[in-house]
């Protein structure tokens, strides 16, 4: 499968691209049912809502299953899906490499107990020589604003943002006068099972809480170009898998 020139332009201009109905529905169903098993068992390693919110609550609500690549063959199958490799190669202009240090996760928004994710760039805690990294988001079911759909600021991956526009945790400050107008330009597209969003590691995005009665469960992993090297002895300097073209 190849991207059209207008899809390539869209990614380059906006910093994200939606591929409707991309992943096989049966694959998504299997991913979802395996994800639910791991979520029910709260299988480590996880990120909990309580840890994310830094509160003393002793309950554990899973926010994210981490390090999913080795957990199930079906997770590895999706993260090395042949059909996506050519597209990623085109957008990165380099051989895609799966980064197991970052994302490599199943992201949830549990009803009532989920938290909002503030505006941020994924690259905020990553350490690479350049920004040639893309996150691959897969909707395993319907995603819309009420259950915590991602929203993006088009073109934000190309902006020269200043340190003062972010807080100490590198969240993009909503109340900062320079950021208000930019946030007004946010866009969203509802997602269905099998839809994929590819987004640049500097594209600003956020997601609200889930105010519905049903969990939202999505798969997210990160890819970099082969020539984008991690900085030695940082969190990013971790296992990687080269995805050769096997179309
Ligand atoms: O679903 C969410 O809360 C957003 C997740 C996200 O932006 C991320 O993992 O970088």
Image (cartoon, rainbow, N blue to C red):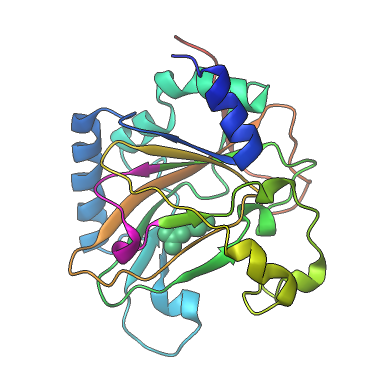
Q: Residue furthest top?
A: 247
Task: Say if 154 sits above or below 224 in the image.
Answer: below
Q: Would you say residue 85 is visible in this rendering?
A: yes
Q: Position of residue 42 (x, y in %)?
A: 28, 64
Looking at the rendering, the stretch of residues picked out in magenta corresponds to: 138-149
Residue, x 35% and y 29% (percent of image)? Answer: 77
User: Which residue appears farthest toward the bottom when viewing the image?
Assistant: 56
Q: Residue 59: give x, y in percent of width and height.
A: 31, 83
Residue 124 shown left or right of residue 145 in the figure: right
Closer to the camera in the image, 198 or 228: 198
Foreground residue, 126 or 236? 126
Which residue shows up at 35% across the image and 33% down it? 20
Q: Is residue 192 magenta?
A: no
- Does residue 240 appear left or right of residue 227 in this picture? left
Residue 98 horizontal/vertical position (percent)? 55, 34
Image-based side of 193 in relation to 129, left or right: left
Residue at image location 78% in from the left, 60% down from the top? 161
């Amino acid at each position: 499968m190849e991207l059209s020139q207008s899809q390539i332009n869209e990614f380059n201009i906006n910093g994200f691209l939606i591929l409707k109905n991309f992943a096989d529905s049966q694959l998504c169903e299997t991913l979802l049912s395996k994800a639910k098993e791991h979520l029910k068992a709260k299988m480590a390693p996880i990120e909990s809502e309580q840890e994310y919110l830094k509160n003393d609550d002793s309950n554990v609500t899973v926010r994210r299953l981490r390090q999913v690549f080795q957990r199930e063959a079906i997770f590895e199958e999706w993260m090395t899906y042949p059909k996506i490799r050519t597209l990623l190669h085109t957008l990165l202009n380099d051989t895609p490499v799966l980064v197991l240090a970052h994302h490599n996760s199943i992201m949830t928004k549990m009803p009532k107990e989920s938290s909002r994710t503030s505006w941020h760039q994924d690259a905020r805690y990553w350490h690479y020589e350049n920004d040639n990294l893309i996150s691959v988001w897969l909707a395993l079911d319907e995603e819309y604003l009420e259950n915590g759909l991602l929203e993006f600021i088009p073109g934000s991956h190309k902006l020269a943002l200043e340190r003062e526009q972010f807080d100490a945790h590198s969240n993009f400050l909503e109340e900062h006068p320079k950021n208000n107008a930019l946030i007004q330009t946010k866009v969203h597209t509802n997602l269905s099972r099998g839809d994929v969003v590819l987004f640049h590691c500097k594209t600003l995005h956020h997601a609200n809480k889930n105010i519905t009665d049903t969990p939202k469960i999505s798969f997210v992993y990160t890819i970099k170009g082969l020539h984008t090297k991690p900085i030695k002895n940082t969190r990013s300097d971790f296992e990687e898998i080269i995805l050769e073209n096997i179309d």
